[in-house]
Image (cartoon, coloured by chain):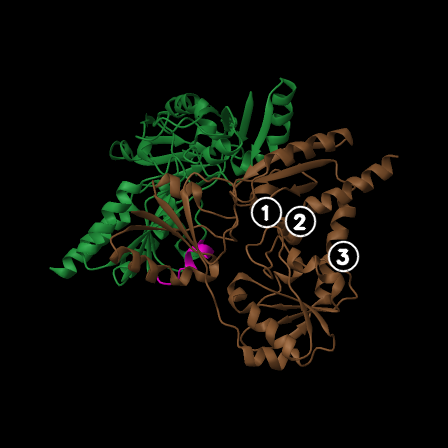
Chain colours: A brown, B green
Amino acid sequence: MRILLQFPEGLKKEALAYAQKYETEGHEVLLSGASCYGACDLAIEEAMAVGADKITHFGHAPFIKKKLLIEVEYVEWHIDVDLDKFEKAIKELKSDKIALATTVQHIHQLNEMKKILEKNGKKVFVSKGPLAAYPGQVLGCDAGAISSVVKNSDAIVFVGEGHFHPLAIDIDPDKPVFIIHPKSGQIRKINDEIEKLRKKRKGAILKAAYAKVFGIIVSTKPGQFNLAVAEKIKKELSLLGKRAEIIVSNELSPLALNNFISFDCYIVTACPRIADDTEAFGKPVLNLKMFSDLVSILRETKA
Amino acid sequence: MRILLQFPEGLKKEALAYAQKYETEGHEVLLSGASCYGACDLAIEEAMAVGADKITHFGHAPFIKKKLLIEVEYVEWHIDVDLDKFEKAIKELKSDKIALATTVQHIHQLNEMKKILEKNGKKVFVSKGPLAAYPGQVLGCDAGAISSVVKNSDAIVFVGEGHFHPLAIDIDPDKPVFIIHPKSGQIRKINDEIEKLRKKRKGAILKAAYAKVFGIIVSTKPGQFNLAVAEKIKKELSLLGKRAEIIVSNELSPLALNNFISFDCYIVTACPRIADDTEAFGKPVLNLKMFSDLVSILRETKA
C-alpha cells in the first residue's frame, strides 16, 4: 500500500521512525512536508498528487465528517499527565464546581482527572463541543466542551501545555480559567490573556468598520473550506456598500496576501484562530463571529 | 464563467483592478491568495476547490506542456525597456560578440535591443532554452538561452531588474555577465555573484557527502512535480548505503521541513533554485544537477 504519513509540527520528529516501521511492513511511504495545524488540515492534495492509497494522519482525533477523496486514518498521540502533580495542583483551587477540559493528547486520562477532582470534594462538569470527537476535548476552533457547562461551574480547569487551546474559551471574565501543565503540574490563571485577546479582537472589529475593501479568505484545507459562506459575506458587504473579493489559498501567508495591497481588512472563513494573528497581517483580520459583530456595527452606523 | 485570477507577487497589486474588470464583464471572479513563483506554479488545487472554469495566470509565458485538469490562460505582462538608456549602457561594453537575453517582461523588445547592439557594431547571439517560450528568454530554471550561444560570444548581456534570473547562467567565470536595468540603464557585472553562488553550491555538495539521512523533496506544483525522479534518487541513495525518505509538499517551508529534525540533507526535485536558499534550511539543499555531482563524489569515496 502507498501511504502518505502526515504529522503536526510537534510530531514531525517521529516521522522517520514511523516511515521505517511502515516500510518494514512492506508499504511504500511518503511524508507530507507541509505545516499541519490540526485535524482540519489533511494533506489531500499531496496524497492525490502522489497517488497514495491512504493518509495516515498522526496526533489528532477524527474531525472531518464529509466524504473525502482519499481514505484517512487518524492515529491519536497520547501523552500521559502526571496525575500526582495534577492532584497537588488542584488542591490550590478554591472553587468547588469545576468545568474540566483538555486536548486530545490527554483525553485518555480525563476520567482519572475527574475522579481526582471529585475525591478532593469538587463537583466536575464535562461536556462535548460540537466539533470535538470526545467529551472534555477542546479544539482550537471549538471550546464547546467548556462553554456549555460554564454556567454551572465556578472555575474552568484546562490541562495542557500551551495557551492556544484554552484561549478559545470565550467566557465571562469573572470565571477564573486555570491551565494545569500535564508534566510539571504548574497551575496558572489565564484570564488576563483571554481578556487581552478579547480586547485585540474588539480593536480589530472597530478598525474594520473603517475598511472600504475587504478580502474574504477561503482555505482549501479540507476541514476549513467554506466557499458558500464567503459568497454570502461578499453579498452582505456589497449591500453595506463595501467592495469585497474572495481570496482562495491553502496556507495563508501574510506576505503573499499583503502583496495585494488594496485590501483594508480580511474576513477569514477558514480557521477562526487565524484572526488571533492580526499583527502578522498588519491589517484587521476577522473570523466569522467577529464579522457578525462588524455587520451589527455597520448596520447601526448606516441606520 | 467562474475565473480564478493568479498573479505573481510583483503583480498582486493589480489584482483588484482586474477582478473589477472581469466582474464588470459578467464573470464570477476569485483571487488565488498563495505565493506564486513562476509559470510552473499554477493554482490548480485552488481552482479545483472552488470549481473554477479557468485559471487566468498573469505575468508569465506558457510553460507547462502536460494536460492540466483545468484550462489555463497565460496573460503576459510587458514592461518597456528604456531603449535610449539601454543604448547608452551598451556603449560601455568592450566585447564585440554578445549573447543577449532577458525575462518575459521585456521579451517584446528583444529584437529592438538586438538591433541597437548591431547598430553599435556588435554581433548578437540569441537562442532559446528548452523550457522557455521565446528565444532570448531566461527562466529561473532555464538559462539555455545563454548557455547554448555562450561559446560564440565574448560577453553576456541580460536585461532585467534583479539578479535572480541571470544567476541561473552557469558559465565559465572568464566570460563577463552584465545586467542592464530596464528603466535606469544601469549596467553592472555580476560574475562575482555567480562565482559566489557556485562556491555556495560546491560547499553544500561537499557537506552533503557526510549526510546519512536524506529528504527527497517533491513539490505538488504542477510544473515542478517529479515523483518518478524522486523514487529513482531514493533507490540510488539506498545503493550508496544512505537512508532516504520522499517528502511531498506544495510550498516548501524550511520551518516545517526542519521540524522533521532527522534529515541531514535535502534533495529537491522541484524548482532547482530552491537550492540557492540553503541557508534558510540550515542544511545542505541540493538540486538535481548538484545531486549528480554528489553521487560522483560518493561513488569515488566508495571505490
- CB under 8 Å between callouts 2 and 1? yes
Mark with earlier residue (3, 1): 3
Residue B188, how many percent across, how many down?
44, 42
Instruction: Inspect the image, locate mark 2, and give the three-letter code of the amino acid beneath it.
Output: Gly
Label 3 or label 1, whichever lies nearer to me, is: 3
Badge 2 is on which residue? A282
Q: Is residue B192 magenta?
A: no
Question: In the rendered view of the protein, which quadrant contains the C terminus of chain B?
Answer: bottom left
Q: Determine which of the numbered discs, if any, sits on residue A254 in the image.
A: 1
Q: Nearer the viewer, residue A245 or A125?
A: A125
* Mark pair 3, 1: CA separation: 22 Å
Question: In the rendered view of the protein, which quadrant contains the N terminus of chain B?
Answer: top right
From the viewer's perspective, tell me whether residue B78 is left or right of residue B210.
Answer: right
Span highlighted in magenta in the image? B254-263
Question: Helix or strand or loop: what does disc 3 sit on?
Answer: helix
Instruction: Inspect the image, locate mark 1, and give the three-letter code of the amino acid beneath it.
Output: Pro
